[in-house]
Amino acid sequence: MPSAIAAADRPPSPHTRLVVPVLAFCGMVVAVMQTLVVPLLPHVPALTGASPGAAGWLVTITLLTGAVFTPVLGRVGDMYGKRRVLLASLGVLTLGSVLCAVSSDIGVLITGRGLQGAALAVIPLGISIIRDELPAERVLPSIALMSSTLGIGAAIGLPVAAVVMENFDWHTMFWASAALGLLDLLLVLRIVPESPVRSPGRFDLLGTLGLTGCLVGLLLAITQGADWGWASGRTLGLLGTSAAVGLLWGRYELRTRSPMVDLRVSARPAVLLTNVAALLIGFAFYANSLVTGQMVQEPTSTGYGLGASLVVSGLCLLPGGLAMVALSPVSARISAAYGPRTALGLAAVVMAVGYVVRFYTSHSLWMIVAGATVVSSGTAIAYSALPALVMRAVPVGETAAANGLNTLMRSVGQACCSAVVAAVLAHLTFTAGGRTAPTLHAYLLIFLVAAGTALAALAATLFLPSDRPRDRAAKGGTVAVSASVTAARESA
């Protein structure tokens, strides 16, 4: 295995202080891609001649490629170099953006969106680089910011896309995405060093194919089940196939010497329950993003809608994005003082409270914004605590892969949320002003389900190993994380 070089033995980089801002900027750009096309979706059929079902694939394909490539590229980064894979991911994002910018063909657009989604691996790769490169006292606050970019970018992407849609040709947002991707590439080449920490073994191609088949079948069934019918042959067939492939894949992974996912490590309570909590937090977070804009845009004839414009509806989530930026260092301090388990439990409670606020204040724009911001605040604390919990439970050589799996679980939670929200809004409807619209009770039910999911995440958190005093560090990082970093760096 290529040896890790102690940080003290390496010449200091003149750009060390810029590593975290550059990685965080990369993370936000990638996260923006997840919600960039949401305001565009209702207009895609008219703009491209595609069916509404085909237009929906502009979101679905991003979810699928992100889910598949995030753990895979995390593992590749652990083995062959995290910066190298980070650059490749950003290059794929830039290429996908250019494809979307130069074409109005739905097939090309779906291909480009798939490439954009594959770049989601940038976030776990960035977390792993931070763990390898920074002094121990800077690790926890830095990974808190890096992890939060997944929510920050998603919150920022909606209003930015809405403003572009209102004022410019829709291709402009993809040209801007390409420019940001190219800027990210140049910044990483200039600022971010290659991590010397490597994981031994050979790349598990068969395990990668098995994981891909399992995830694609599962997520296709979840995202398309509402359109196909939950009891249809296609949906049940995909779920059954996914389960069968998953069982065979798990058996193979347990027997191979260099698995794609170390299931023995993943089955540890500290890792398993953290991933369960990530799935539930992802569900609770995404409900906030999905329904806020649609709810305030509903016409006043519904009795609860505010008839807001596309731009106003997008701006409703902007305070939440700013709150996430502000709270990521606060979450790191909470984790340092009381442990990341405590921080995650607090986050789940804050998210549940935010949905209670939303349940009782759905007629006022400012209270809707306040409730959405409370939910986003809880999400910031949760997303900051999750990688700290993962890193204290896995070997340093598996950091990117383990965080990739945790990010995957958030994506699966978001996919489940999307399916539930679509089903509720489609089935609880009434006629208002000559059009069919979701009832107020549909939105309130979503808030209750999301609050319940946040409380389920709290329950999973309570079963995690306790934050013992010896696991804490005095200056912003846990001893468990610091010790693993030090051990890897001194293994030369």
Image (spheres, helix red, strand yellow):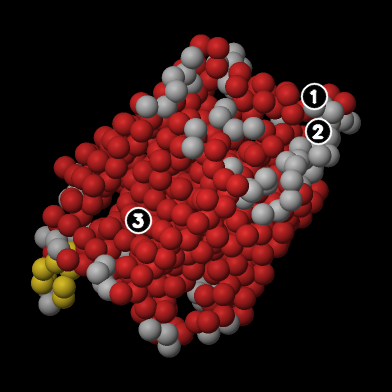
Disc assigned to residue 459: none
Q: Mark 1 points at which residue?
A: 490
- Of the pair 223 and 394, the residue shown nearer to us: 394
Do the numbered discs 2 and 1 sit on residues whose CB atoms are within 8 Å?
Answer: yes
Tell me which residue sits at (47%, 71%) in the image. 58
Provide residue 458's location: percent of width, then percent of height. 33, 32
* Disc 2/disc 1 C-alpha distance (Å): 7 Å
Q: In the picture, residue 30 is in which quadrant?
A: bottom right
Q: In the picture, residue 263 is in which quadrant?
A: top right
Q: In this view, does 487 lie to the left or right of 431?
A: right
Tell me which residue sits at (53%, 46%) in the image. 405
Q: Residue type at mark 3?
A: Cys
Residue placed furthest toward the top: 469
Q: Is residue 369 above or below residue 172?
A: above
Q: Is residue 93 above or below residue 10?
A: below
Q: Which of marks 3 and 1 is nearer the N terminus?
A: 3
Q: In the picture, residue 191 is in which quadrant?
A: top right
Q: Name the residue under label 2.
A: 4
Q: Which of marks 3 and 2 is nearer the N terminus?
A: 2
Disc assigned to residue 416: 3
Quadrant of the drawing holding the N terminus: top right
Q: In this view, does 315 lie above or below 40?
A: above
